[in-house]
Image (cartoon, helix red, strand yellow):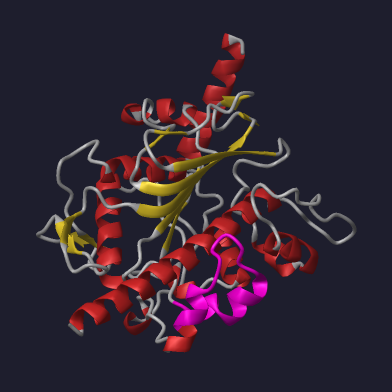
Amino acid sequence: MSGAVARRLTGALTLALAGCAGAPPAVAPLPPAAALPVSAALDRAAEDRVLALVPERISAEEVRQVLGRAPAPRIINLHGSVALVTMAPFADFLVAMGYPAASLRHPRDGATSQSSFADSAMLAGTIAWYYEREGMMPLLIGHSQGGMLVVKTLHELAGAFRREIPVWNPVADAPEARTAIVDPATGARRPVVGLRVPYAAALATGKLPRVLLGQWDMLPLLRQVPDTVEEFTGFFIAWDPIAGTFGASDPYRPTGTATVRNVTLPAAYSHIGLPLTRHLAENAATRAWIEGYAPGDRAPAPPAGAGVDDSNIIHAAELWHSVKKHWCREAQRQIRARRARATAAAF
């Protein structure tokens, strides 16, 4: 890429980042009583049905009849620095596909999309607070700069920036005077540093904006995925001037045992428009394709034809498959942990 082209792209991106950022659309706050998800009271038979599910193969019927009746982990959606499109449309897509709305809303203001200009230590402390209170580790999904914050938070949990992180209460929007939680699965005391989230994803997160925004500490870490996440998916648009990817995708790599996937999206996809996925759940053809999708399968081509808008269907299908899988796994973990505590208490 020539210097002149690079300067033009850099100037355009700088103007976009400086001039287009704005507040996300207003979201009606939830009443305090409904601010936090309430764990579903499952009887033994319902728990057995959840335990019988295969996380990698969750059908639409199983979402409706089995998984949809179980508790769901909180999903923290982080939008990019340019808030023309937040992650709220993606949250709407998840709800339309069957995910509980309460597990997507911030407990203080009801928002389903959060700013990517937040502090990573605060987000790490918030994850710990949710886990201790709700009994399930949150999932993290970030778009553009939101993906950077996802990766930075994973490094934060790995102790890359500080030895201790305060627990952060998102309802009070303030830190608590402690740096550890009581693990709801074991009853043991655990520091915030070292906690591991089940799933995280970054959509169209590039290095060029890190340079323009002076986020120098993340340049060497942006593509490194630490062991503080079990599974991670990085999404790229191959020729994305906003993210600064020009051809080769500069893939994410695990630093240890994390499972990492890199997914290249069609060149026709829009960087800013990636969260716009609600329409895919509302159309019968695209919804059925997404419900039957599994990574690695030789899936048929996405549906096409009159009245079918398949824009953004690839990452929507990938993310819904991962969300279902980790929803199932976390519900199963919670059930097994509760049964193990009951068994231990009986002796």
Extreme residue in the top direction? 3
Extreme residue in the right direction? 306
**Location of residue 159 in the rendering, given as x and y in whole percent from the top left corner:** 22, 40
Q: Residue at x 26, y 80 (%)?
A: 343
**Location of residue 231 in the rendering, given as x and y in whole percent from the top left corner:** 46, 48
Q: Residue at x 71, y 62 (%)?
A: 292
Is 16 located above or below residue 193 in the figure? above
Observer able to see residue 105: no
Q: Which of 345 and 17 is in front in this view?
A: 345
Is 259 located above or below residue 281 in the figure? above
Q: Does the magenta stretch include residue 116?
A: no
Q: Which of 166 and 49 is in front in this view?
A: 49
Is 144 located above or below residue 58 in the figure? above
**Location of residue 269 in the rendering, given as x and y in whole percent from the top left corner:** 69, 42
Q: Which residue is drawn at 80% across and 64% down?
A: 285
What is the number of callouts on the image?
Answer: 0
Extreme residue in the left direction? 177
Report the quarter where the N terminus lies: top right
Report the quarter where the C terminus lies: bottom left
Observer able to see residue 253: yes
Q: What range is drawn magenta here? A: 47-70
**Which image quadrant is residue 282 in?**
bottom right
Q: Residue at x 45, y 64 (%)?
A: 329
**Location of residue 271 in the rendering, given as x and y in whole percent from the top left corner:** 61, 41
Q: Is residue 55 magenta?
A: yes
